[in-house]
């Protein structure tokens, strides 16, 4: 399928622009309806633990230090020091120069090291720089690479350039999994998000990711639902399963549970696993822990119950 489609910009354009147009009103209505589903207390407890296990606990700041990364790793390994039954997070996500620090801190734990790459967050760099960025992160121990696409190239219709960049980064990843970030807030239309989803999956993405968390519009229920539908349709067409990672702006347990309901209703149990669904977040874990303790004890903790990241 890929060999037939990715022969030229014209061939890719025919395929991507031949995808069904997105009914924006219908999409937003479906997302809103799914967000109103209520779940019972036992299901809520399960959903909270599942959401914790799906978090890519993230620090992507210019002021990051080895000490801050080690502290974040410690929190990811043992989110609630007062309750050892709290699950570990899926991964710790850092810049490439901090990947080795995270790898050492997480050694033998099963928690993955994720690293952003390819001139994150703008993606404005020469291809050899993007590939060097990726190889540096993998060499330092990253199990997963979160790359950003060249949104300028995509919006200009240079689909083959974006496709080939994703393929090249995927090759540079070696055994590491590749998450491809679209920055949905900059793609402007739902049709573009659907096209970017298919383009990335055709190029070999293991995950598709909504956003960097560095712009005004990040993950939203409608744009995430659109991506969930894309991975569903892609598996039906190709037999290959691809994961989804909403990132940016998901801060509360209530929001996280809405996303899990959306995954369950759209994709079913096949995607309800950290192997296929992740939350990119820095503060979400705190609220999940607060709500988890409320379910356990019947009351909320004081403000010092969780660490402030």
Image (cartoon, rainbow, N blue to C red):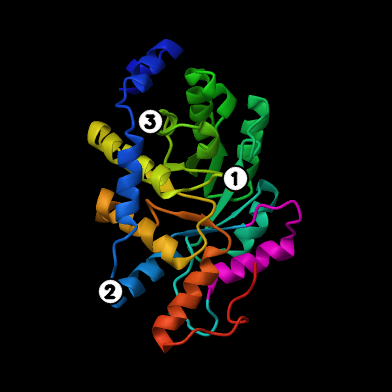
Give the alpha-carbon distance from disc 3 to disc 2, as whole Å: 36 Å
Disc 3 and disc 2 in contact, CB within 8 angstroms: no
The answer to whether 256 appears left or right of 155 in the picture is left
Quarter of the image with the N terminus in it: top left
Of the image marks 3 and 2, the number of the one nearer the N terminus? 2
Magenta stretch: includes residue 62: yes
Q: Measuring 34% from the left and 49% from the top, which residue is drawn there?
A: 31
Q: Is residue 282 visible?
A: yes
User: As rendered, which of 77 and 278 lies closer to the eye?
Assistant: 278
Compared with 152, 234 (above or below) is below
- Tell me the SS state at disc 2: loop
Give the alpha-carbon distance from disc 1 to disc 2, as whole Å: 33 Å
- Tell me the SS state at disc 1: loop
Quadrant assignment, res 3? top left
Q: Measuring 61% from the left and 40% from the top, which residue is drawn there?
A: 117
The answer to whether 6 appears left or right of 67 in the picture is left
The span shown in magenta is 59-79
Of the image marks 3 and 1, the number of the one nearer the N terminus? 3
Check disc 2: other Cα within 10 Å, few if <14, some if 14-19, many if 20+: few
Check disc 1: other Cα within 10 Å, few if <14, some if 14-19, many if 20+: few
Give the alpha-carbon distance from disc 3 to disc 1, as whole Å: 24 Å
Residue on which disc 3 sits:
198
Quarter of the image with the C terminus in it: bottom right
Nearest to viewer (mark 3 / mark 2): 2
Residue on which disc 1 sits:
216
Residue on which disc 2 sits:
40
Of the image marks 1 and 2, the number of the one nearer the N terminus? 2
């Amino acid at each position: 399928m890929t060999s037939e489609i990715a022969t030229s910009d014209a061939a890719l354009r025919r395929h991507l622009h031949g995808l069904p147009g997105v009914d924006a009103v219908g999409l937003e209505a479906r997302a809103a309806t799914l967000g109103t589903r209520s779940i019972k207390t036992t299901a809520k407890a399960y959903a909270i633990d599942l959401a914790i296990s799906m978090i890519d606990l993230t620090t992507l700041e210019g002021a990051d230090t080895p000490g801050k990364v080690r502290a974040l790793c410690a929190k990811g390994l043992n989110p609630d020091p007062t309750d050892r039954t709290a699950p570990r997070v899926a991964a710790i996500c850092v810049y490439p120069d901090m990947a080795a620090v995270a790898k050492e801190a997480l050694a033998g734990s099963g928690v993955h090291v994720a690293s952003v790459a390819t001139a994150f967050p703008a993606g404005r760099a020469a291809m050899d720089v993007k590939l060097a960025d990726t190889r540096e992160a993998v060499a330092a121990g990253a199990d997963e690479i979160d790359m950003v696409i060249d949104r300028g190239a995509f919006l200009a219709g240079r689909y083959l350039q974006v496709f080939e960049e994703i393929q090249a980064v995927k090759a540079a990843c070696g055994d590491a999994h590749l998450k491809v970030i679209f920055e949905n807030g900059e793609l402007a239309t739902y049709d573009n998000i659907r096209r970017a989803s298919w383009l990335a999956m055709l190029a070999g993405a293991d995950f598709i990711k909504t956003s960097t968390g560095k712009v005004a519009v990040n993950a939203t229920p409608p744009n995430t639902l659109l991506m969930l539908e894309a991975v569903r349709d892609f598996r039906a067409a190709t037999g290959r399963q691809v994961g989804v990672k909403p990132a940016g702006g998901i801060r509360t347990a209530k929001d996280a549970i809405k996303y899990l309901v959306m995954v369950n209703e759209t994709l079913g149990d096949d995607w309800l696993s950290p192997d296929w669904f992740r939350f990119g977040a820095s503060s979400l874990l705190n609220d999940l822990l607060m709500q988890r303790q409320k379910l356990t004890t019947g009351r909320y903790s004081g403000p010092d119950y969780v660490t402030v990241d």
